[in-house]
Amino acid sequence: MKTHPYRLIFSLTILVGLVCFALFTARLVQSAAVLPHFNLPHIALLCLAARLLTHLLAPQRTPTPTAAPLAAVVFGVLPLCAGLVTPDFALRLALAGGAVMLVTDFLFTAAADRLASAKATPLALPAAALLLFLAMQAFTAVWL
């Protein structure tokens, strides 16, 4: 099977773009509504959802080396273009997005490799992604 090195970034771009579009539309319809900000658990959720979607489409055994810099570009540019963040916050969001993508890509690939070596149910990998998301939320609560 031919590998596509940018499949993960394409799925991440689609997910982040859909979230930015939904937040932009919600702000357009209800300008007085209080919308959620991008923070580390949201970034981790988007990264893990993109990685899970990519893994379900075509399983990959190794982490993607270009995922972190391209994820930084995705998390920096798309919310800025949608008008959801200021330029200085977009820079911080890009740095956090690249770091979170690097960590989640490594941990998810390790969990997928471990689950592939044994007999596991089809829901084991989404459960591992959910546990990684909950661990990121706990880490954020302790760290910040």
Image (cartoon, grey):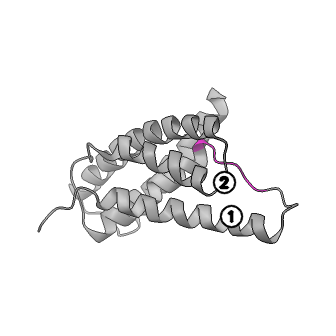
Quarter assignment of residue 91: top right
Q: Local crowd at mark 2 within 10 Å, few (<14), some, or many (≥20)?
A: few
Residue hosting label 1: 24
Give above or below for 31 relative to 81. below
Residue under the point 59% across and 46% down: 41
Per the image, label 2 sits on a secondary structure element best described as loop
Residue under the point 76% across and 63% down: 27
**How far separated are the C-alphas under marks 2 and 1?**
8 Å
Q: Is residue 132 left or right of residue 115?
A: right
Foreground of the two, 58 or 132: 58
- Magenta part mainly helix, strand or loop? loop
The kind of residue tagged 1 is Phe
> Which label is found at residue 83?
2
Name the front one of labels 2 and 1. 2
Q: Are marks 2 and 1 in contact (CB under 8 Å)?
A: yes
> Does residue 125 appear in this view?
no
Foreground of the two, 16 or 119: 16
Residue 43 position, x and y percent, is 54, 48
**Which range of residues does the magenta coloring cover?**
35-40
Residue under the point 28% across and 57% down: 6
